[in-house]
């Protein structure tokens, strides 16, 4: 046994640049910031609503501005990426055994996409 | 006899001699490889014909013993399962497993993993003592299937080399140890989960995992340690709710 094994330092700030799979992981994690931002926007919406009709209408109008639309589009893309990256790993976290065999992963993933579609449609028609 | 395809490969091997070197350095070997060779064959060629001082671990040459784990072109691989023909560039970089200290050349210090593995008690702890005369512990095929994939772990530590979390927080119990704890927890003959949970559900246990999933991607035996860890998180979370919201319910 040697007395001085060599320890290779791992960079605390740039470690994820070394592998594509680490970058994919960071993309999944970073996209949650956009979801946080949108949640914050909803809280602001509530605050404007509490202030009265005029404040809320001004807020809604601001959402329709090019910047507001751009924000929504970016958040939508980030949210879809974030959600899909989690849906796709659900079979690993929640395997279902029926009798001897495990339910195929794509059925578990598919159920998530199905539930997503149903909830989206309900909100869409409920809001109309 | 047909002529076997030969290809000259530049093997870049990270060398480190603790007695003379202050840091590791790459050494290049030109190796005449046969097309069906694996990286381990190329290393054996170097050892036999070019440089007998090269140190590395290997034993079975058939992806069973788990000794020859190393970084091949930056990817954790079993050297016996990394085929030369998959590396088209003609140059292959071989380094010791990432996230482990280098003992010498491609040999790493693995005591950390061994002690972590032992700490999760990776063996059957029967629910109650039973005399041999009582007969065997029976198990249905479905009960076996529940944990079978985790029994395939060969302790090769590729998952530790792939795990960025282990690299950043060396205290992390890590993928294979927790996956093996899960293997015994899932076994219908076992009653040792509470003992294992003390280590597995601690801060340095499963909660250090942020589900990068790299461990499962590099696992040569398709154990899916990342899946095991997420299942351990779900079970540990249910424990917490039972304990705090329904203290009258027994685990």
Image (cartoon, coloured by chain):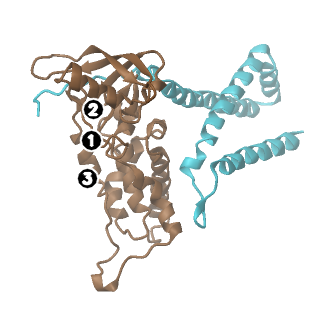
Chain colours: A cyan, B brown
Callout 2: chain: B
Q: In the shown orientation, is residue B32 left or right of residue B216?
A: left
The percent position of residue B160, horizontal first and vertical second, equals 36, 37
Distance (Cα) linking label 1 and label 2:
20 Å
Q: Return the residue at label 1.
A: B59
Asked whether B175 or B57 is in front, the reply is B57
In the image, what residue occupies the spot 57% across and 31% down?
A: A28
Which of the 4 quarters of the picture holds residue B26? top left
Distance (Cα) linking label 3 and label 2:
18 Å
Q: Mark 1 packing: few (<14 Cα in 10 Å), some, or many (20+)? A: few
Check the picture and name the quadrant holding the C terminus of chain A: top right
Q: Pick out the residue farthest to the right.
A: A128
Distance (Cα) linking label 3 and label 1:
22 Å
Asked whether A76 or A102 is in front, the reply is A102
In the image, what residue occupies the spot 65% across and 33% down?
A: A39
Question: Which numbered disc, 3 or 1, marks the residue closer to the eye?
Answer: 1
Q: Return the residue at label 2.
A: B100
């Amino acid at each position: 046994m040697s007395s001085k094994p060599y320890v290779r330092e791992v960079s605390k700030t740039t470690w994820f640049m070394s592998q594509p799979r680490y970058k994919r992981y960071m993309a999944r994690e970073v996209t949650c910031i956009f979801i946080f931002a949108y949640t914050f926007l909803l809280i602001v919406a509530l605050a404007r609503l509490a202030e009265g009709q005029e404040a809320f209408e001004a807020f809604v109008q601001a959402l329709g501005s090019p910047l507001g639309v751009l924000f929504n589009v970016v958040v939508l893309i980030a949210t879809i990426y974030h959600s899909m990256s989690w849906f796709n790993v659900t079979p690993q976290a929640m395997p279902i055994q029926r009798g001897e065999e495990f339910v195929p992963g794509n059925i578990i993933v598919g159920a998530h996409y199905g539930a997503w579609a149903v909830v989206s449609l309900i909100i869409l028609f409920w809001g109309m | 006899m047909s002529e076997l395809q030969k290809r000259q490969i530049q093997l870049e091997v990270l060398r480190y001699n603790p007695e003379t070197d202050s840091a590791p350095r790459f050494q290049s070997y030109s190796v005449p490889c046969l097309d069906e060779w694996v990286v381990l064959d190329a290393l054996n060629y170097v050892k036999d014909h070019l440089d007998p001082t090269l140190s590395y671990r290997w034993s079975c040459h058939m992806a069973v013993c788990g000794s020859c784990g190393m970084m091949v072109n930056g990817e954790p691989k079993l050297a016996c399962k990394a085929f030369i023909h998959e590396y088209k560039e003609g140059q292959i970089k071989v380094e010791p497993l990432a996230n482990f200290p280098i003992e010498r050349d491609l040999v790493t210090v693995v005591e950390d993993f061994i002690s972590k593995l032992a700490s999760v008690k990776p063996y059957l702890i029967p629910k109650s003592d039973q005399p041999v005369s009582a007969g065997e512990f029976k198990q249905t095929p479905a009960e076996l299937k529940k944990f079978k994939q985790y029994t395939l772990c060969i302790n090769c530590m590729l998952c530790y080399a792939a795990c960025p979390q282990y690299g950043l927080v060396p205290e992390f119990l890590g993928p294979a140890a927790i996956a093996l704890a899960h293997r015994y927890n899932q076994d219908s003959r076992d009653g040792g989960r509470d003992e294992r949970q003390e280590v597995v559900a601690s801060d340095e246990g499963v909660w250090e995992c942020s589900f990068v999933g790299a461990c499962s991607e590099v696992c040569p035996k398709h154990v899916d340690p990342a899946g095991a860890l997420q299942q351990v998180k779900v079970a540990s979370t249910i424990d917490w709710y039972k304990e705090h919201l329904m203290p009258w319910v027994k685990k």
